[in-house]
Amino acid sequence: MTTASRATQADLLEQRIAENRQSQEVDLVAWIFERARINPTDQILELCCGTGGQTLRMLDSLDENGRVVALDLSATALETLAGKASGEKSLNLTTVQASLDELSPALERSGFRRPAFDLVFCAYGLYYSQNARSTLHEARNWLKPHGRIVVVGPFGPNNSQLFEMVEASGITLAEAVVSSSRRFMLETVVPWAALQFATVRISTMVNPVRWATPERVLNYWQNTTFYDAARKPAFEALLERHFAKHGQFVNEKWVMMVEMQDARS
């Protein structure tokens, strides 16, 4: 299974989210929406919604006039999300199966016309676009006047502790993995935002994830895009030595949120 295909596997995504959520020091979803406020009537386009890690929180913030249009490449992920958004929540949700690189045609096929959205939101997924700047331009074109774009993703020394152990077990991390995990937000999102919008707010945090057993670390790694079954024995040996010495494994998630408003003419 390739890195790209593992990234869109709904079951792998659910496992990664679960392992992070259970052991993270800061509730990531709460942190995001303490900063990116949702208005009850907002019309929201969510890119790379996955299985709904942030979608459900946005739906909870809307009244009967608000809507989330959730776009993802994975039909299974969208089915999982739809199952979670049961009852009244489902009335405010529209799902669209499409890649980031066919954003506008997919929305137009679904009956939307520009400008349609008060907020375009994307967390941990924009780097899967074949051309992220083009995707951002398309997203901007769908914004209503005074609309916002919010992008959340990793940056800097993100995942350093896990990456070091993975590399020590004999794995060479793919350039796409390293770039998306460490450089994408700083090198792609921030410069584009500064050029395209008059108001740009950047928030960052370091979120320690504390895994109490080797099995928890292993389960997370096995569900990532950089898992290598051939190196599992070496990785397990390193884990065993680490836990014998430290009793836990702490992996730091470095998180950045870029909120853009007031598009330049």
Image (tube, grey):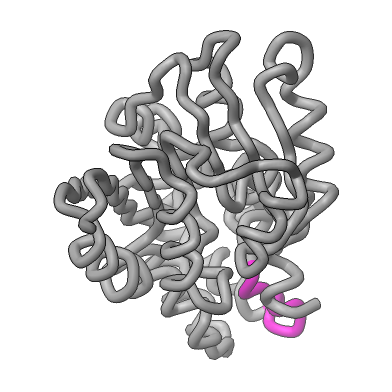
Most extreme residue toward the left is 198
Q: Is residue 31 left or right of residue 169?
A: left
Residue 193, percent from left and from top: 26, 61
Quadrant of the rendering where the N terminus is positioned: bottom right
Q: Which residues are magenta?
A: 225-233
Residue 140, percent from left and from top: 41, 55
| Magenta-colored stretch includes residue 228 | yes
Vertical comparison of 132 with 39: above or below: below
Residue, x 75% and y 71% (percent of image)? 5
Quadrant of the rendering where the C terminus is positioned: bottom left
User: Residue 224 or 258: which is nearer the viewer?
Assistant: 258
| Magenta-colored stretch includes residue 227 | yes
Q: Is residue 70 left or right of residue 110?
A: left
Residue, x 57% and y 64% (percent of image)? 240
Numbered label tally:
0
Q: Is residue 166 left or right of residue 196?
A: right
| Residue 22 appearing in the image | no
Residue, x 77% and y 42% (percent of image)? 78
Residue 252 sits in which quadrant?
A: bottom left
User: Residue 57 or 47: which is nearer the viewer?
Assistant: 47
Vertical comparison of 46 with 178: above or below: above
User: Residue 103 or 159: which is nearer the viewer?
Assistant: 103
Vertical comparison of 123 with 180: above or below: above
Residue, x 28% and y 31% (percent of image)? 35
Vertical comparison of 123 with 117: above or below: below
| Residue 42 appearing in the image | yes
Residue 43, percent from left and from top: 51, 29
Residue 110, percent from left and from top: 75, 44
